[in-house]
Every structure is written in C-alpha cells, then in structure tokens.
Image (cartoon, grey):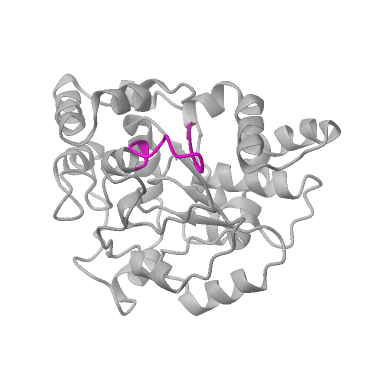
Amino acid sequence: MSILPERTRIYQNHHFDSTRWNYFEPRDDDIIVATSYKAGTTWTQAIVAHLLFPEGNFPAAPAEMSPWLDMRIMPLEVILNRLTAQKHRRFIKTHLPLDGMLYNEKFKYLYIARDAKDVFMSLWNHYTGMKDEFFMLMNLLPGRQGDEFPRPPDDIHTFWRNWMTRGGFGWEADGWPYWSHLSNVQSWWDFRHLPNIQLFHYSDMLENTEREVRRMAAFLEIDVSESSWAGIIKAVSFTEMKRQGELYAPGGGHFWKGGANTFLHKGTNGRWRDILSKEEMALYDAACKRALSHECREWLENGGMI
C-alpha cells in the first residue's frame, strides 16, 4: 500500500464518472463527504451545513450547496460554476472508492460507513421507489459507460443475491447493479491513519448524535458556540430532517415516488434480521471474506471510534 492514496482506477457507469474530478479546482479548506451509498450521506451533508451555518441560514439547500460531483445527471460545467461561485467553505459529496477519488493533503475527508445489511435494506427502498424518469435519465443520457441501469427485481431476495454475488465493475465481486459497498469501505479504511481522513459509523451517529457531530466539528476545525449546539442537534435529528425533507433530499426528492418522504425513509438499523435467511447470510459472509480485512469487517458490523 502506498503512503498516500492514489487514483489507480476509473469508475464509470450509469450513475457516475470519476474523471469529472479531473476538472475540479480545489481550495485548501475543501471538505469531502464520502460514502458508498445509503450510509448517511444526506445526514452528514446536513450536519456539515449546520456546522457551517449554525443559524440555519443556508445560501441554498444542502444538497445544492454540496453537489455530488461524480454523478452524471447534472452537467459538470453547472456544478463547477456553482462551486466556484461559493464564498463559504465548500463541502462536496462523492460515492467513489478512494482508489478512484482525487486525494489532496489539504482537504478534510469525512467518510461515513454503515453495516452492509442495513445499507441493503435502505438501498432496496431507494431502488424500488425510483420513478421511471430516473431510469430514463441514467440510461439515455449521453456518455453512459457499460450496461444500462436495470429496473429492480420484484423480489428483495433476488436483489440480495445479485448484490452479494455480482460485481458492478470487473474488479469487484459484489454490489450489482450499483458498485461494491464492501470494497468502497475497505478502500477508505486502508488510509484511516491519515490525519485528513476521518471515518465515522452510522450506528455511532444514531447512538449518540451530539458526540459524533462534535467529533466532526473538531476534525473539520469548525468552532461552534455552545449556545448553538442544542439547535444544531435538533435540526439534524431524523424527525426534523424528515419534516423538512424537500430541503435535504437530493433534488427535493423529485425522482422518488412519494418524494422526499420516500428518500428519507426510516433511518433505522436491524430491519434485515426479519428478511435475510441463514443461506443468504452465508452469501454475505463469503462476500466479506473476499472484500474486507478482518479488522475492517469488525468495525463495519459494530462501529466504534477509530
């Protein structure tokens, strides 16, 4: 493993294109909010927005302030122009593994991970709630590399088997038709020792939100007055974020049946226990053995401060 992360792979599919980062003009205080998917991305974007703007006086909705730069749907020029125009400290979203992501020693990288089984349950809701127009955009927008983005199967168990046993890229063995959640986590875990990369776990954020948000603020070197903390923690609670779902959901939730209410679904863990069989858990165990180190798997399943 190299001392510093290097971009050794290009990730291009129906959803994203890692080469879009080639055109990004960095600032030394940029913040990167990174996850594989369905692991607390929108939540963390909201947290950073409230840390930067404790009174909630955002210049734009958090998802607009913090664009998913690698996503193909929004024209790259539009995103780059918006980021250039921002006067505040910027925070940009990515779903790329670290081996496909721009690394800059001056940036601060917030990586949020979540148990794969919980990611799966959230992803099933996300995937089955998509409107037809989203699939049309993914598949008909010029520049798509690889296969079309397929409609979800009728059965959650079919989706689990595919997600656990088929790779979205040639070098991955799970994650289809998206990309590997497991490999994504491992790529960031391998560089957790770097001072500008900090890993957080969704379960820890649920268990003690204020503690984890204060850790984020300290890592990002954002000073927040004590009088502002109660308001921030309330604002980033699931109840409050769901109440203002159109403010936080990407595109206001436009691409999901039921809108933002579908996108911000439950925010809970453990629902997989009533769904996955012993045989299906064996597929998970095999996938973990292929993609994760023992230490990374332990942390991914159980959380805990690193």
The residue that appears at 77% across and 38% down in the rendered structure is 224
Q: Residue 92: percent from the left, percent from the top?
A: 54, 57
Q: Is residue 236 left or right of residue 9?
A: right
Nearer the observer, 82 or 129: 82
Q: Is residue 107 above or below residue 17?
A: above
Q: Does the stretch in magenta take in 192? A: yes
Using the image, determine if residue 45 lies above or below residue 234.
Answer: below
Q: Is residue 255 above or below residue 41?
A: below
Query: Percent from the top left, x then y, of residue 249?
Result: 56, 53
Task: Determine the image quadrant of residue 225.
Answer: top right
Q: Is residue 128 left or right of residue 63?
A: left
When asked about the image quadrant of residue 80, the answer is: bottom right
Q: Is residue 113 magenta?
A: no
**Start and end of the magenta stretch?**
188-201
Please state if 206 lies on the left or on the right of 234 as rendered.
left
Name the one closer to the observer, 132 or 2: 2
